[in-house]
Image (cartoon, rainbow, N blue to C red):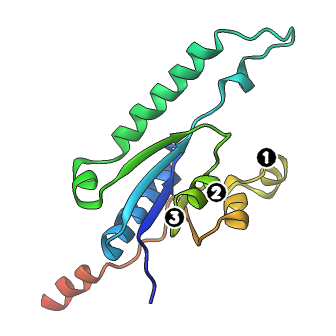
Amino acid sequence: MIVLKQILVATDFGDAAEAALGYGRELARLFGAKLVVLHVADNAMGSTIGIEGYVGAYPDLQRSIEESANRQLADAVTEDDRRELGVRTVLRTPALTIVNYARDEAIDLIVMGTHGRGPMAHLLMGSVAERVVRTAPCPVLTVKHPEHEFVRADALVRVEAV
């Protein structure tokens, strides 16, 4: 028997992540699990150092990035999600990755979107989803956009009734 108590959906707020959130919601409902939505915020330090080594208004920029990400996290989940699934939203910076969070919080399943980039882009940039799959302490479900539409059991009941 498969038991899922906590499902983590990692989001970058893109289309594939939105599809992954849909899967996470349905799986949480099906298994009676808690749903956690996690975003790993960009580190402003990596994008503010210029050729001269000048660091701009790093604290203000980082705070702005994190505030924007928190607003997007709040917008990504509905009141129904909060009430029915006990959704928590979590924001981390790259120092605490998806895998570390899953390990620390005893997550049972990670659901995340994947962009399905071509082999050359994958070679040059790598894949967050691939690294999570290889190193996660639990199973990982990756979802592409547009995703495969699974037939829901209640849809079959309605078809049989007609």
**Considering the numbered disc 2 on the image, is that residue within a helix, a strand or a loop?**
helix
Q: Are marks 1 and 3 in contact (CB under 8 Å)?
A: no
Residue at 66% x, 30% y is 43
Q: Quadrant of residue 7?
A: bottom left
Point out the frontmost of discs 1 and 2: 2
Residue ID for mark 2: 99
Residue at 36% x, 68% y is 33
Residue ID for mark 3: 107
> Upstream in the sequence, badge 1 or badge 3?
3
Rounded to the nearest angstrom, the CA distance separating label 2 from label 3 is 10 Å
Rounded to the nearest angstrom, the CA distance separating label 1 from label 3 is 27 Å
> Upstream in the sequence, badge 1 or badge 2?
2
Would you call the spot at circle 2 few (<14 residues within 10 Å), some (14-19), or many (20 or more)? Answer: some
Q: Is residue 73 above or below residue 141?
A: above
Query: How far from the left and from the top, in percent, is residue 130?
Result: 71, 61
Residue at 52% x, 43% y is 39
Q: Quadrant of residue 158?
A: bottom left
Residue ID for mark 1: 125
